Image (cartoon, rainbow, N blue to C red):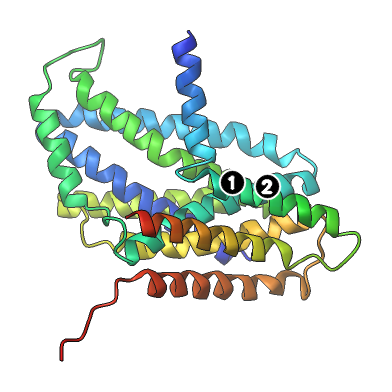
Amino acid sequence: MIAGIKAVGMFLYHFFVGDDWTIAAGVVIALAVTAAAAHVIPAWWILPAGALIVLAASVVRSGRGA
Amino acid sequence: MNATALFVTVFLACAVEAVEATTVVLAMGTARHWRSTLTGVAAGLLLLAVIVAALGPAISAVPLDVLRLVVGGLLLIFGLQWLRKAVLRAAGRKALHDEDAVFHQQLAAAEAAGEDRRGLVQDWYSFIVSFKSVVLEGLEVAFIVVTFGANAHDVPVAAAAALAALIVVAAAGVVIRAPMARVPENTIKFAVGVLLCAFGTFWGAEGAGVEWPGADAALLALVPLYAVAAGALVLALRPRTKVSK
């Protein structure tokens, strides 16, 4: 039973988070900052900028490790 | 959202996953038992259809802002993961997905596995391997179909695109009866990654309360932005060859 729950948990983690957890964490943070800033300043640029920074950091880190 | 963009994104995403599933299915059918293999494929597709049919209306009932925030965020995470792998492969930092190698690995494993008949299924091994391959490769596509379709208020177009991709890839598999090693999988993954990132960013930011300059036209800037940035990362990561004097 516990093994089954663990297996489902691992599957969901890999399905939604994937190989690099920093990507999911970065997107969540960028979305939260966007939501907080949206009522104060034009915040359309925050999410794409955050996503590009997260992608570049992840790729460079993995590329160096290869 | 334009129905053509919806169709193209889902079609490409489904096609690339279907190519990978077809390799496993071909290996099982060739090495073991075609009827059990195809029964496994049918069972897998049926499960995916049930998931889409159940989740589609359920997701469509969620308030639009919440839907766009959550789904946009998830699509952006998926897109960045696809793009990350495609960039690393294109830069030579990660091995390309080799359908020939996968086919021969699966073939060897299938030939070594023992006989096992269960109920109506004559060969359980080929049934279960084909079923798992179709479900695991198809689950992400099912999610894309449901979320793209719900956001665009057009789940039927998304489902039709997935079905069309399945038919095209299955027909190609039947005709060539060999792994589709010549399909430029990494290029397709790169394109799908760019599209998922662009739409995920657009919807996620809208869900967070952003008003895009130019409204829907912002997508026409987001797609080339991600494509150019990912292309630049490929160039930056490619090993530099030294020119001998």
3D distance between C-alphas at marks 1 and 2: 6 Å
Q: Position of residue B206 (x, y in %)?
A: 77, 58
Q: Which residue corresponds to the image point at 47% horizontal and 60% vertical from the top-left?
A: B192
Q: Which residue corresponds to the image point at 23% horizontal and 38% vertical from the top-left?
A: B25
Residue type beneath disc 1: Ala
Q: Nearer the viewer, residue B7 or B206?
A: B206
Q: Nearer the viewer, residue B177 or B179?
A: B179
- Vertical relation: B50 (above or below) B146: above
Query: Does residue B155 appear anywhere in the picture?
Result: no
Q: Chain of mark 2?
A: A
Q: Nearer the viewer, residue B149 or B210?
A: B210
- For the N terminus of chain B, the quadrant is bottom right
Q: Position of residue B35 (x, y in %)?
A: 20, 28
Which residue, given by chain and number where applicable, does mark 1 sit on? A24
Residue type beneath disc 2: Val
- Mark 1: which secondary structure? helix
For this view, does A58 lie left or right of residue B106?
right
- For the C terminus of chain B, the quadrant is bottom left
Query: Does residue A54 appear anywhere in the picture?
Result: yes
Which residue, given by chain and number where applicable, does mark 2 sit on? A28
Q: Chain of mark 1?
A: A
Instruction: Classify residue B182 by image quadrant.
Output: bottom left
Mark 2 surroundings within 10 Å by alpha-carbon count, few (fewer than 14), some (14 through 19), many (20 or more): many
Q: Which residue corresponds to the image point at 74% horizontal and 58% vertical from the top-left?
A: B205
